Image (cartoon, rainbow, N blue to C red):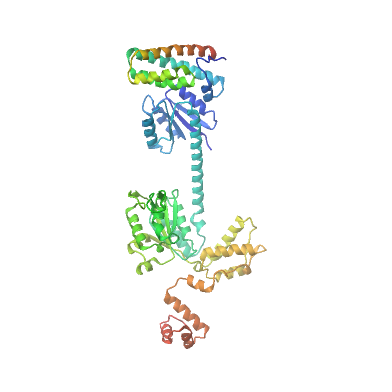
Amino acid sequence: MDAFRIFIVEDDLLYGEMLRRHLTLNPDNEVYLYRNGEECLKNMYREPNMVSLDYSLPDMSGLDIMRRIKKDFPEIPVIIVSGQEDISTAVTLLREGAYDYFVKDDDVKDRLWNVIKKIRENLQLRSEISYLKEEIGRKYEFRNVIKGNSPSIKQIFSLIEKSTKTNISVSVTGETGTGKELVAKAIHYNSNRAKKPFVAINVSAIPKELIESEMFGHEKGSFTGAVTRKIGKFEQAHGGTIFLDEVAEMDLSMQTKLLRVLQERELTRVGGNDLIKIDIRLIVATNLNLAEEVKKGNFREDLYYRLLGMPIELPPLRYRGNDIILLAKHFVDEFCQENKMKKLSITESAQQKMMQYPFPGNVRELRAIIELAAVLTDTDKIDESHISFNAVDAAENLLMEENTLAEYNRKIISHYLQKHNNNVLLVAKKLDIGKSTIYRMIKEKQIVL
Amino acid sequence: MSENLELYHLDKLIGFVGDDPAAIANMVGIFLQTTPELLETINESFNQKYSEKIAKAAHSLKPTLDVFGIDSLHATIRRIEQKARTEEFDNELFELINKLNIVLEEVFNSLKINYL
């Protein structure tokens, strides 16, 4: 850590010099002594880490100087060291933002050391947080989050980049495992809100009775079990981004409340009366078709349009062609590095096997398959025998596609026709449907024999 | 160096600046430079009945006298400040200021002998 810069503002030469000498006993401290407020303000360009201010100065009061410091440098802690043993003065100063208030008594020495220790620890924590935020930012750079060269994924990069430039709401859709939350994080950590919080809520994971309190907070005693005040996720995300995952699962009454908050940009905690202003960027995600949900009456149309913003539809992995291999290689490298294993390659046959698989669990499933393969191999290669798709059965694969009922009908009838040599009568009997239905589908070219 | 323990003790000062003779001598030097000025302000202001000036000078002297361990003036200086703030120019204030002068004169002399 750099030197800890302390300003002492003290008109009493003896006391000021004594404090200066005392604080310089720690060689990490760089101490400056000023005899009046103007001198201190003139030197604020040195950016002290802390200002120790005498309350009674010849040119202005400690309160006036503190106000001027706080106006331009709100982060710098100001300690008032005063001969005044007056509680009301101390209360006023603390209310106005003083970090602490000491009387010039025998304890001032120890209290100063303690307060400096505390401020240094805070500074250390702040610098660690800032470093970690930068690290997270790097982690969520677009190309680190989403790997791929396919045209569909390049289009996603372009949309993400555009969405970071403004505060527009973003709705991310895509099958399970396509990386909706990663996209939300990439948008947040590449936007001008990156240093503020990213708060995620999985709507489907929170019981209906608790969702309002979870999102908007509650006041103490507002319901049984509300033993303390709780700050909701929206308040926590103030200045940053809130990510509502599985937003289609929200019930209609909560949708109404959410709409109001989004329109007014203010909320009221459950059981509270105060209106709390919030500044958030909203990103929502769902694996359902929200427009369909609106048609079905499960989702409010006005909320739908407010949430829609910039739609980003993540393509299923099976439509991303060679990205499957690119991602597989990335995951195997990452896994080997994390587990301090020697580098593994993926054989041509293993690649072929993966290219033919529909990956209903998308990228998440691919990662799991690759990690298992890396563990199973005894050589420096992953071959097809290490690639196992047993985790998800074929029926589930079909359901993962999330087709319409008509599309499923078409697929099932086509499958049966292929299996039974296009014998329409037999298939109609097996599926317990009219043969005319099948003939009509053939005629309308819904089914190609 | 011997201290006149009846008059003052420098434990607190050493606690602040460390047991460094040069630093202590420097602080004693500042004390001998600034304290007589404040004492003079109190004396003159008493004669001219400038209560605010007395209160301010007494207020400044409080921590200085504490740091130099001049315990016999601990209550005296506070009482002077209090009486000046309430503008009580009575005999008690005269006696208090008189005591302040006598004790400090002795302290100045002793410090000069021992530290300069």
Report the number of numbered marks: 0
Q: Nearer the viewer, residue A232 or A71?
A: A232
Specify whether residue A223 is in view: yes
Above-or-below relation of B41 to A262: above
**Residue drawn at the location 55% of the way across and 30% of the way down:** A27
Q: Nearer the viewer, residue A205 or B78?
A: B78
The image position of residue A222, as x and y in percent, is 37, 52
The image position of residue A146, as x and y in percent, is 50, 59
**Residue drawn at the location 41% of the way across and 38% of the way down:** A74
Above-or-below relation of A352 to B7: below
The image position of residue B72, as x and y in percent, is 46, 17
Above-or-below relation of A79 to A262: above
- The part of the image, by quadrant, that contains residue A40 is top left
- The part of the image, by quadrant, that contains residue A206 is bottom left
- The part of the image, by quadrant, that contains residue B46 is top left
Looking at the image, the residue that sits furthest to the front is A224
**Residue drawn at the location 51% of the way across and 74% of the way down:** A395
Specify whether residue B57 is in view: no
Task: Left or right? Give the position of A264 relative to A124.
Answer: left
The image position of residue A42, as x and y in percent, is 40, 30
**Residue drawn at the location 33% of the way across and 49% of the way down:** A275
